[in-house]
Amino acid sequence: MAKSDTHYFYVLACKDGSYYGGYTTDVARREAEHNAGIRCKYTRNRRPVRVIHSECFETRSEATKAEAAFKKLVRKDKDHYLREKKEGDTL
């Protein structure tokens, strides 16, 4: 297995309206795994899911720290974070 130099923190929107934050080196593969019910109990009964946000980092540590920080936020703050990131992409 090739080692990836790119690490991602990603956010899924689940069918029930909840968010799921995770870490991966391949966002498309991970989204497919979630939708297939592989390796994540949380999203298994909340399919289909779709990636609504991803951020690229140089190290796994940076990406998992971003994931942990996102998971600590309350829903209102998660919505605000995602809105800010989306607006930043359009500038």
Image: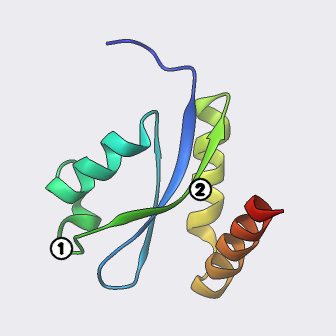
Q: How is the image coloured?
A: rainbow
Is 2 on the left-hand or right-hand side of 32?
A: right
| Disc 2, SS | helix
Q: Outermost residue toward the right?
A: 91
| Residue at horizontal 27 percent and vertical 66 percent from the top | 43
Residue 76 occupies which quadrant of the picture? bottom right
* Mark 1–mark 2 CB contact (< 8 Å): no
Name the residue nearer the viewer: 31 or 78.
Answer: 31
Query: Quadrant location of residue 91?
Result: bottom right
Q: Residue furthest top?
A: 2
Q: Is residue 69 left or right of residue 18?
A: right
Q: Residue at x 22, y 61 (%)?
A: 41
Number of residues whose C-alpha sits closer than 10 Å to that of mark 1, classed few (under 14), some (14–19) or many (20 or more): few
Residue 29 versus residue 77: which sits nearer the camera?
29
In the picture, the disc for residue 66 is: none
In percent of width and height, residue 63 lies at: 61, 42
Above-or-below relation of 43 to 34: below
**Residue visible at 62% across and 64% down?**
70
Is 88 rendered above or below residue 73? above
Name the outermost residue toward the front.
90
Residue depicted at 49% across the width and 20% down the height: 4
Three-letter code, disc 2? Ala
Q: CA distance from mark 1 to mark 2?
A: 22 Å
Q: Residue 31: horizontal and vertical position, in percent?
A: 33, 52
The answer to which image quadrant residue 89 occupies is bottom right
User: On the image, numbered disc 2 is attached to which residue?
Assistant: 68
In the picture of the structure, the residue carrying the numbered disc 1 is 45
Which numbered mark, 1 or 2, is in the foreground of this view?
1
> Which amino acid, by three-letter code, is at mark 1?
Asn
- What SS does tag 1 mark? loop
